[in-house]
Image (cartoon, grey):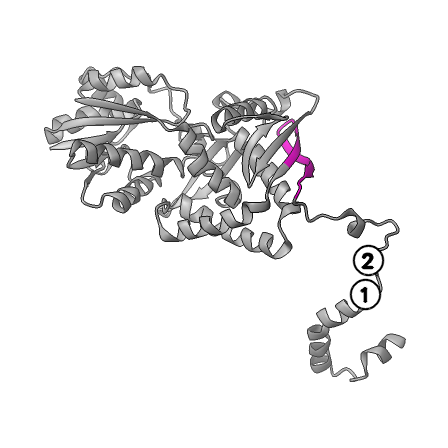
Amino acid sequence: MKVVLAYSGGLDTSVILAWLKEHYHCEVITFTADLGQGDDLEAIRQKALATGASKAYVADLREEFLTEYAFPTMMAGAVYEGQYLLGTSFARPLIAKYQVQVALQEGADAVAHGCTGKGNDQVRFELTYKALAPHLRVIAPWREWNLRSREDLLDFAAAHGIPVSATSRSIYSRDGNLWHLSHEGGPLEDPWREPDEEMYQLTVSPEAAPNRPQYVEIEFEQGIPVGIDGERLGPVDLMVRLNRLGGQHGIGRTDMVENRLVGMKSRGVYETPGGTILYTAHRALETICLDRETLHFKDLVALRYAELVYYGLWYTPLREALDAFVRKTQETVTGTVRVKLYKGNCTAVGRRSPHSLYREDYATFSKDEVYHQADAQGFINLFGLPLKIRALVTQGAPTAPLTEIQRD
């Protein structure tokens, strides 16, 4: 039997690698994705081989992660439950896609992951497997073995000579990539307790941020971020810079209790400095480039899109169809947005576009020659006609002509 394991090199997957070999007497091949988490990937590859993997694949997926997953989600305006910018949610389908590719290339019988039976990630991985290679067997050790805690994993690792960096005092469960860093577990399991400041790794506290605001200009082409402060940048360099800028000013901290797909509530704390800046800037540009009806309908699509991503339904006809709608809306979303970063706040303070629908000559409160204010009377009369008729029926009001009532 040959199994391809999604491998991070952390405590869980290191133990799983050894457990698979011991329990299933199988050949294990590992796959590790570089999503910009900052790990030493060569060290992870060597660790996998030293722990018993027959082969260890590593793939740099940073640009694809941004251009095909993070940016489309941002352009959709998708935010789960009004706060979560979905950084882990859209990472899992990408990792699983390449894990499946390795399994097919190697003629593997099964794929394995290190997700617990309580979380959302197990669904995201396994729905991808079903969509791309339904014949592969899925092994989820957390749903099979008798190891029940982090301490159990540490004991197993010690007994099998597996080197791990985690200790019983390192109690946060984290997931990081170019888009965000998430924190769960440990003290965060008490929703009344404020997160310890030392937990944060990407952002300074707003109180410790600079006392002077910083202005940043973000350039977009058809909804895609392409430059900062007049300098054109590739997606990876752009995100690295925005994360640094946002982190310096305490931008992008989110502390929320979310509804997991499996039915329970869970508290998570997220750091998404660059992503928060992009969401803010992109939305500001859309307000001048999209007409009212499209913008409002897109807000409805954003809610459903966020649910699809959170639930792991990336490789579905509906998500693809919604993407087609979003891409159409982005054809005119080209321009520049100026944002103000200051002590945890990211505010759009300027926006411009060659496709802007904003017309100062129509919107001005000063004297103008293009808008006749008297025209509003007829519009209001017709727009409010259902209200008038209902009042006439329910209140027994006289049925005098509208012009006669107005003269009174």
In the image, what residue occupies the spot 70% across and 22% down?
Answer: 212
State the image coordinates of residue 244 (x, y, percent, origin top left).
55, 22
Quadrant of the rendering where the N terminus is positioned: top left
Q: Which residue is mark 2?
A: 371
Say whether residue 198 is magenta.
no
Circle 2 SS class: loop
The spot of residue 296 in percent (x, y) is: 59, 54
* Residue drawn at point x = 63 percent, y = 21 percent: 209
Amino acid type, label 2: Tyr
| Residue positioned 22% across, 17% down in the render | 162
Q: Where 40 falls versus 243 (above or below)?
A: above
Residue highlighted by disc 1: 375
The answer to which of 259 and 324 lies nearer the viewer is 324
- Indicate left or right for 266 with 286 as reference: left
In magenta, the rendered stretch is 336-354
Above or below — where is 193 with respect to 49? below
Q: Is residue 161 left or right of residue 65?
A: left
Outermost residue toward the front?
Answer: 354
